[in-house]
Image: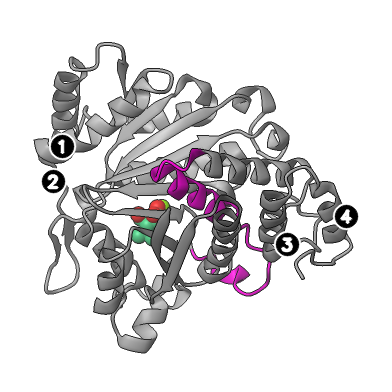
């Protein structure tokens, strides 16, 4: 298969984790005889620095002419600490989601058996967790009209949803549930918000088309508690933009590190793959960032193109690295020798030689790269 992949490394640790994902995709291309072309473009704070625009036109153009987009991370402390900044890195990502109409964001949350001790949650609570979060990504309060009064003392953000916006992601969530454990939980705040009541009505109506799927509802405050109290009760979680943002970060605690959580965003035409973690500026350039979320986002990219064996091999490589404790400091605070690059190298080697990765493990622990 020939794929043109737009690479938007972005800010902070974005470039270092994305290059591990590219390394892994190149190994897959070699092993399975595919041709993947990678073209890089600027986004976020880097693009503001150079072009005063967090999403330059040529970046958008590249994305629109590519088969898929691999995204790194976005954000910089100089903007986080300056609420009055008019141009912000996050605007680049939001505009990209909007321009490409990426309305469905899929965030899988899984408890890996080998990492059960790494989560601050008790092992028996998280063991076996396998959730797929469907977060609406181009509507709601993120994109509603914003207002700041002239005196700067009153502000508002409008949260608006239409039936159409709810239906299109709900269909995807129901289809996903059909191929999983056949359960959807709609997370909302229907006891207070009109938009949530619309979500309930529309999703309930739609559920009649999917009689094999059980639909239930949770208020978001309760859902926030249930996710860490009893995560195994969930299969597919369907929710609006802001709630999805919050509960997916929360759910990452189950896996032991936010550095493990990948995501895919789909629209009617385009698809973008990105780790859910942010730009982690404190770690930039130190080689301590966990590249697994980015590597697993690459696996989701492969699955999107129905390259299932390829994706499976990437996942096995990741699982093997976790089994062998080839992990960054977020999962293994004692480790000061295994770097972001080492993990990419390990998965790369695993792909070309799945049965022989113990040798690489030894080399990595000796601080020797196995890549010549
Ligand atoms: C995410 C991020 C983004 C969001 C930010 C960077 C705009 O937190 O993808 O979860 O809020 O959607
Ligand atoms: Mg977020």
Nearer to us: label 2 or label 3:
3
Q: Nearer the viewer, residue 242 or 98?
A: 98
Pointer 3 residue: 342
Q: Which residue is mark 2?
A: 160
- Mark 1 highlights which residue? 195
Label 1 to label 2: alpha-carbon separation: 7 Å
Residue closer to the observer: 89 or 214: 214
Q: Is mark 3 within 8 Å of ligand 1?
A: no
In what element is the residue under mark 1? Answer: helix
Residue at x-position 81% and y-position 46%: 356
Q: Is residue 301 magenta?
A: yes
Query: Which circle's residue, 1 or 2, is located before the other in the chain?
Result: 2
- Which is more N-terminal, label 1 or label 4? 1
Could you tell me residue 180's position as x and y percent?
A: 42, 22
**Quick check: is the Cβ at mark 2 less than 8 Å away from ligand 1?**
no
Residue identifier under label 4: 362
How packed mark 3 is, by other alpha carbons closer than 10 Å (few <14, some 14-19, many 20 or more), is: many
Question: Residue 17 occupies which quadrant of the picture?
Answer: bottom right
| Residue 87 visible in the shown view | no
Q: Earlier in the sequence, mark 3 or mark 4?
A: 3
In the image, 307: left or right of 157? right
Read off the magenta span. 279-308
Gap between marks 2 and 3 measured at Cα = 45 Å
The foreground one among 245 and 312 is 312
Alpha carbons under labels 4 and 2: distance apart: 55 Å
Q: Residues within 10 Å of mark 1 (few under 14, many from 20)?
A: some
SS at badge 4: helix
Report if residue 353 lies within the magenta region: no
Whether residue 124 is visible: yes
Q: Are marks 1 and 2 in contact (CB under 8 Å)?
A: yes
From the top left corner, tell me how far across and down residue 281 is, in percent: 54, 70
- Of the numbered discs 4 and 2, the one sitting upstream in the chain is 2
């Amino acid at each position: 298969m020939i794929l043109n992949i737009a690479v938007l490394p972005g800010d902070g640790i974005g470039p270092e984790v994305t290059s591990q994902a590219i390394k892994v995709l190149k190994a897959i291309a070699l092993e399975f005889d595919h041709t993947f072309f990678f073209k890089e473009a600027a986004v976020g704070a880097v693009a503001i620095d150079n072009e005063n625009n967090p999403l330059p036109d040529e970046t958008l153009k590249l994305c629109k002419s590519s088969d898929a987009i691999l995204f790194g991370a976005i954000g910089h402390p100089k903007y986080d600490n300056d609420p009055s900044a008019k141009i912000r890195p996050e605007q680049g990502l939001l505009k990209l989601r909007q321009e490409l109409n990426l309305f469905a964001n899929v965030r899988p949350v899984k408890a890996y058996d080998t990492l059960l001790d790494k989560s601050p949650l008790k092992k028996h609570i998280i063991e076996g967790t396998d959730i797929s979060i469907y977060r609406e990504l181009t509507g709601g309060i993120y994109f509603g009209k914003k207002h700041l009064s002239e005196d700067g003392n009153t502000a508002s953000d409008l949260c608006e949803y239409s039936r159409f916006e709810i239906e299109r992601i709900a269909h995807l969530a129901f289809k996903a549930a059909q191929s999983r454990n056949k359960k959807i939980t709609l997370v909302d705040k229907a006891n207070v918000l009109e938009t949530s009541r619309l979500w309930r009505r529309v999703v309930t109506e739609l559920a009649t088309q999917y009689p094999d799927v059980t639909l239930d509802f949770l208020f978001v405050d309760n859902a926030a508690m249930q996710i860490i109290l009893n995560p195994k009760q969930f299969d597919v979680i369907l929710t609006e933009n802001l709630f999805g943002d919050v509960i997916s970060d929360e759910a990452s605690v189950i896996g032991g590190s936010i550095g493990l959580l990948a995501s895919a965003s789909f629209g009617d035409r385009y698809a973008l793959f990105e780790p859910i973690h942010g730009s982690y500026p404190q770690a930039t350039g130190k080689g301590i960032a966990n590249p697994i979320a980015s590597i697993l986002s690459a696996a989701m990219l492969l699955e999107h193109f129905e390259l299932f064996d390829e994706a499976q091999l990437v996942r096995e490589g990741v699982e093997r690295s976790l089994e062998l404790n080839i992990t960054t400091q977020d999962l293994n605070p004692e480790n000061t020798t295994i770097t972001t690059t080492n993990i990419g190298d390990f998965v790369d080697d695993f792909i070309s030689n799945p049965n022989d990765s113990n040798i690489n493990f030894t080399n990595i622990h000796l601080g020797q790269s196995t890549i010549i």
